Image (spheres, rainbow, N blue to C red):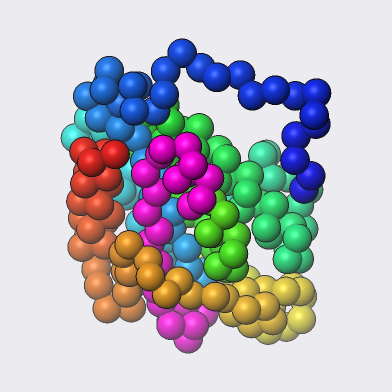
């Protein structure tokens, strides 16, 4: 996507994310969960959101499937479409996090370059960002197949499906790796909540 028109000028707000964080007593952050379909991203994200809200920390899940019903509606699943979906999710997360909340993004986001661009946008804006690899071996993710997508991909009904006919570039240095074939959901959620708490205190 092209950048903003030269006629569009960024309107600076009255408060920076740091000033807003000081007023609220905490800073916001983005927790970005990447992984194969069926790895457990959405399950962990929703439970982490609930756990954070229970302790008084505002949080919002931005789920990739949900975003494709609205913000990213009409985008394809080719490389360009995926890149734009990640970019839009990143911009939405940045707005949520800059408001002082925890944005929890659950999105396959298979390409390292796309994830790096989202991190760079957060860094440039002074908003904390952490990448979590929700890691399940392909065979395990496929055995779960909660949406029947792997079955359809193997049958040739879905083109460019990550892990089957399209690559997944696993993060090499995520802030957190959750091995969901070995760890319980509760322990994964606890790790996410602890990470979010560290970020909102230090940001």
Residue beneath the point at 70% across and 23% down? 9
User: For the point 75% across and 60% down, which residue is it?
Assistant: 80
The foreground one among 190 and 93 is 93
* Horizontal side, residue 86 vs residue 127: left or right: right
Q: Determine whether, in the image, residue 150 is placed left or right of residue 54.
A: right
So how many labels did they put on this image? 0
Observer able to see residue 153: yes
Image location of residue 119, percent across then percent down: 48, 52
User: Does 133 lie within the magenta span?
Assistant: yes
Q: Is residue 3 above or below residue 180?
A: above
Q: Is residue 10 above or below residue 128?
A: above
Percent from the top left, x then y, of residue 109?
57, 62
Nearer to us in this view, 33 or 154: 33
Residue ID at (35%, 21%): 20
Image quarter of residue 44: bottom left
Q: Position of residue 43 (x, y in %)?
A: 39, 57
**Residue at 76% across, 52% down:** 75
State whether residue 184 is above or below residue 74. Answer: below
- The quarter of the picture where the C terminus appears is top left
**Is residue 59 shown to the viewer in this render?**
no
Which portion, as a residue range, is magenta?
119-143
Where in the figure is residue 168, as x and y percent of width and height? 57, 76
The magenta stretch spans residue 108: no
């Amino acid at each position: 996507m092209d950048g903003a028109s030269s006629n569009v000028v960024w309107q600076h707000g009255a408060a920076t994310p740091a000033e807003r964080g000081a007023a609220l007593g905490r800073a916001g952050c983005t927790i970005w969960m990447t992984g194969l379909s069926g790895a457990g991203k959405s399950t962990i994200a929703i439970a982490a959101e609930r756990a954070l809200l229970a302790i008084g920390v505002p949080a919002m899940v931005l789920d990739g499937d949900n975003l494709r019903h609205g913000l990213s509606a009409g985008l394809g699943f080719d490389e360009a479409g995926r890149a734009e979906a990640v970019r839009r999710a990143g911009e939405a997360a940045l707005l949520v996090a800059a408001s002082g909340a925890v944005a929890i993004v659950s999105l396959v986001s298979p390409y390292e370059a796309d994830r790096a661009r989202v991190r760079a946008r957060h860094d440039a804006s002074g908003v904390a960002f952490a990448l979590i690899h929700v890691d399940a071996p392909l065979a395990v993710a496929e055995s779960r197949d909660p949406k029947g997508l792997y079955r359809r991909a193997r049958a040739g009904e879905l083109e460019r499906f990550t892990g089957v006919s399209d690559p997944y570039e696993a993060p090499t240095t995520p802030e957190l790796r959750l091995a969901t074939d070995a760890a319980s959901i509760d322990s994964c959620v606890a790790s996410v909540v602890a990470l979010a708490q560290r970020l909102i205190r230090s940001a």
